[in-house]
Image (spheres, rainbow, N blue to C red):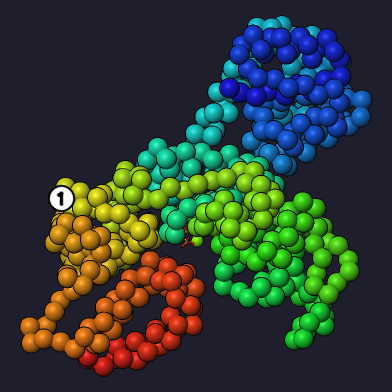
């Protein structure tokens, strides 16, 4: 149901308009003056505003300008008394959608509102299509075939309009959280300002803190000169805090304060600096569980959870599997000058029944590898990697030792285990785009251990014993 805000200081006008609009089934809210109007606009999303140009406190034009800045998509119809057509023209120039003269007739109001809301919904539809076609990064489409992803897209579009709203994106690894964050930024009024990303899992806590808040000269040993933190550097833009679930409790408390006050203090500094950023956080962790286990602050969760966007795992949206496969296939066919034109039925079925633990990222890598290693017109099951084909499918992995090629002449167990480990590590490295911290977590080993193994295998991989 559409939400309409009526701003007028005259009781009669407000009541009259409210009655007409409610009869038509719209939801309404009323404000008697400018301040009340701005408060309401900050709290709830509206689809349309009726705005009297003459208000007791703030001028209607001023409010119009504020609305245009914070939510350029929101339609505003200004209302003027008999003698002030000039100010109505002024309002139209400043971006009002239309104006009506008081007193007005119910029929006229009904028609204007109907047309305005139709325009509004068409505009939004066009934006959805634009995002699907162009995506966040120029001509890289944002694929959304399934109902679930279309729903995500709707949320992205809505939250993009509200340039100050904090967003929390959740979802398994590789589902598209990054893409969602960038899309929100690129379709918001902050698009021309910086989008600054920080992976909270990769920095030790004291460095993370100075990255975020900056520091004054001499704040700690090694702090040479003053440094501006991300919140200040992203001025008027967006800060993307990836892997938010990894932040240590002390820093969580500081972040909570930043979210509440929109002010920061540089490390070693005394002055508070106002910041103007939108915060987009993402995590692949189950935060409610982290809260129960005492690893994540409940109050911070609520503060972030205002607009939650959950990106479902790929296995729950089979329609997207095919759309994404076709998209990546054509991308890599072009890149590697292949002749793939389509995906065969059988291959499609395999793609759809695989579990995709690494989600879209894994799918992208599979298609990339197919294009590197094979060429044909139609992509068939013979091109698919072992883990997607049915015999191995049961075990859900090519890493099953039974399927591992065993040399006829027998083998050395240790060497075999090494090869197996290497394959396992390589697969997980693929799934995490080469991110060692993430890979280490998936493998359940300390980062240093993984580093060591990677170094070890990369030197050994040079020798023919281990491939
Ligand atoms: N809907 C989509 N349309 C097109 N490409 C997508 C879509 N979703 C994800 N991708 C692509 O899949 C890859 C992984 O996505 P992304 O990096 O956004 O995942 P993520 O959820 O941030 O993963 P992680 O939890 O590991 O950080 C990227 O190459 C991204 O462009
Ligand atoms: Mg990511």
Q: Position of residue 260 (x, y in %)?
A: 77, 51
Left or right, 327 with reference to 289: left
Q: Residue at x 75, y 68 (%)?
A: 213
Number of other residues with Cα within 10 Å of mark 1, as a class: few under 14, some 14 to 19, many 20 or more = few
**Which residue position holds label 1?**
346
Instruction: Identify the residue at the far right of this view.
Output: 56
Q: Residue at x 19, y 65 (%)?
A: 386
- Front one among 225 and 173: 173
Which quadrant contains ligand 1? Answer: bottom left
- Residue 173 appears in the rendering: yes
Question: Eyeballing the image, is 41 above or below 445?
Answer: above
Q: Position of residue 211 (x, y in %)?
A: 69, 71
Left or right, 156 with reference to 267: left
- Residue 334 appears in the rendering: no
Q: Position of residue 452 (x, y in %)?
A: 43, 86
- Quarter of the image with the N terminus is top right
Q: Quadrant of residue 420?
A: bottom left
Q: Residue at x 80, y 69 (%)?
A: 266
Q: Residue at x 22, y 83 (%)?
A: 416
């Amino acid at each position: 149901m559409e939400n309409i805000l009526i701003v007028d200081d005259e009781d009669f006008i407000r009541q009259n308009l409210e009655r007409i609009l409610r009869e038509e089934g719209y939801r309404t809210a009323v404000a008697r003056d400018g301040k009340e109007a701005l408060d309401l606009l900050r709290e709830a999303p509206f689809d349309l505003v009726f705005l009297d140009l003459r208000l007791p406190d703030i001028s209607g034009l001023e409010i119009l300008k504020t609305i245009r800045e914070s939510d350029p998509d929101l339609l505003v119809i200004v209302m003027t008394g008999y003698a002030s057509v000039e100010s109505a023209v002024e309002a139209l120039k400043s971006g009002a959608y239309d104006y009506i003269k008081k007193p007005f007739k119910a029929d006229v109001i009904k028609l204007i509102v109907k047309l305005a809301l139709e325009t509004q919904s068409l505009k939004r539809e066009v934006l959805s299509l634009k995002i699907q076609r162009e995506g966040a990064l120029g001509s890289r489409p944002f694929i959304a075939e399934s109902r679930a992803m279309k729903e995500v897209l709707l949320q992205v579009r809505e939250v993009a309009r509200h340039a100050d709203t904090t967003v929390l994106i959740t979802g398994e690894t590789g589902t598209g959280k990054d893409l969602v964050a960038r899309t929100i930024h690129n379709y918001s009024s902050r698009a021309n300002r910086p989008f600054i990303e920080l992976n909270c899992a990769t920095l030790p806590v004291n460095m993370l803190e100075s990255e975020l808040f900056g520091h004054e000269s001499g704040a700690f040993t090694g702090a040479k000169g003053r440094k501006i933190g991300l919140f200040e550097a992203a001025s008027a833009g967006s800060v993307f805090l990836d892997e938010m679930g990894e932040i240590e409790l002390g820093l969580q408390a500081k972040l909570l304060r930043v979210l509440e006050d929109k002010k920061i203090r540089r490390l070693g500094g005394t002055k508070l600096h106002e910041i103007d950023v939108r915060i987009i956080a993402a995590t692949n962790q189950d935060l409610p569980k982290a809260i129960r286990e005492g690893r994540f602050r409940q109050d911070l969760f609520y503060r972030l959870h205002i607009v939650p966007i959950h990106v479902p795992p790929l296995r729950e949206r089979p329609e997207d599997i095919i759309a994404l496969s076709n998209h990546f296939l054509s991308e890599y066919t072009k890149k590697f000058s292949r002749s793939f034109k389509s995906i065969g039925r059988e291959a499609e079925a395999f793609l759809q029944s695989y579990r995709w633990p690494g989600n879209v990222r894994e799918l992208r890598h599979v298609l990339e590898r197919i294009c590197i290693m094979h060429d044909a017109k139609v992509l068939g099951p013979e091109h698919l990697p072992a883990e997607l084909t049915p015999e191995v499918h049961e075990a859900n992995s090519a890493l099953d030792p039974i399927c591992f090629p065993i040399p006829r002449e027998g083998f050395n167990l240790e060497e075999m285990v090494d090869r197996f480990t290497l394959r396992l590590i390589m697969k997980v490295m693929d799934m995490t785009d080469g991110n060692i911290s993430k890979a280490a977590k998936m493998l359940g080993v300390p980062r240093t251990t993984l580093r060591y193994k990677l170094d070890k295998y990369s030197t050994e991989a040079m020798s023919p014993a281990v491939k």
